[in-house]
Image (tube, rainbow, N blue to C red):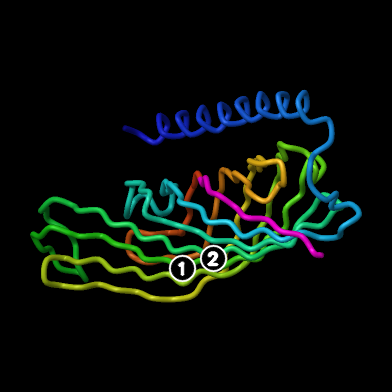
Amino acid sequence: MNNKILYSIFLLFWCCSINVAQIIEQEIEEEIPVFKRINPLTSGISYQFTFRPSYYIPMKGTSSYINKGGIKPVAVSFEIVKPSDYSLGIELSQQYYQQYKERAVYDYDGSLISTAQMRTMNNFPIAFTYSKYFKGIDKTIRPYAQLGLGAIKINYINYWGYLIDDKKRWAPLGMTSVGVKINLDETGNWVLDSKIKYQIAPFQYDFISSVNYLAFDIGIGFRWWDE
C-alpha cells in the first residue's frame, strides 16, 4: 500500500470522525440545552492530559532510509486551556521505526559489500505547543490548529550484517497540526482528541537529509478545572 492510499484513508477516517461528532453534538444540544458542567468562562482555566497512539509515515528526506510507517509511536501531552479559546502545552513522544532491507551490494564507507540491512530509528521529540480553537470551550466539538517548537533526540542505527553504523544527536524540531476535540460526556472531563500532524527536524547523515514525518494521532484526554 503506497503512501497516497494511506493519506486518503487517514483523511477519510478523520472526516468521518468529524461527521459522527457533529451528529452527537446535535443530539446533545437537542437533549441538553445547557452543557451540564461548570462554565469555564466563570470557573477559570482547565487542564488536559492526553495519551495518543500514532501512525507515522516517513516523508521525503527520511523515506529514502525508512519508507515504512508504523503504529509503534506514542505521545503524551499536557495542556493549560484558557477560556479565551487557546491553550498552551507540552508534548512528548517516542518514535521507533525499523525496516529490513534484503541482501544487496551497497557502498559502505567507500567499499562495496554484499549484505542485508536492518535500518532503525528511535527518536524522542519534545515540543511546546500553542493551539487555537475555532469553537468555544463549552462546545461538544472543537476544531483547532496547533503549532509546536522544541527539540528531538535522534538515534540512528543501521545494522549492516555484523557491522553497525550509528549516529546520535539532538536537533531543533518544528511541527504543525490540525485536529478536533470531542467531549465524550456531559461533564466535559473525557475528550476524544484526534489530529493530523507534520513534524520536521534538520538531520543529514548517510541516507537521510532530514527527519520529517506525517502522523495521524487519535487519543483520549482527561480534563479538569480549577476549583
177 in relation to 139, above or below: below
- The residue sitting at 35% across, 74% down in the picture is 167
Q: In this view, does 83 lie to the left or right of 182?
A: right
29 in relation to 221, above or below: above
The residue singled out by tag 2 in the image is: 92
Q: What stretch is highlighted in magenta?
A: 217-227
The residue nearer to you, when weighing 180 against 125, is 180
Q: Horizontal and vertical percent for residue 216?
A: 50, 44
In magenta stretch: residue 68: no
**The N terminus is located in which quarter?**
top left
Find out whether the residues at labels 2 and 1 contact each other: C-beta distance under 8 Å.
Answer: yes
Q: How far apart are marks 2 and 1 (CA)?
A: 7 Å
The residue singled out by tag 1 in the image is: 124
- The residue sitting at 49% across, 63% down in the picture is 93
Q: What element carries label 2?
A: strand
Q: Is residue 33 left or right of residue 80?
A: right
58 in relation to 157, above or below: above
**The C terminus is located in which quarter?**
bottom right
The residue nearer to you, when weighing 144 against 223, is 223
Q: Is mark 1 on a helix, strand or loop?
A: strand
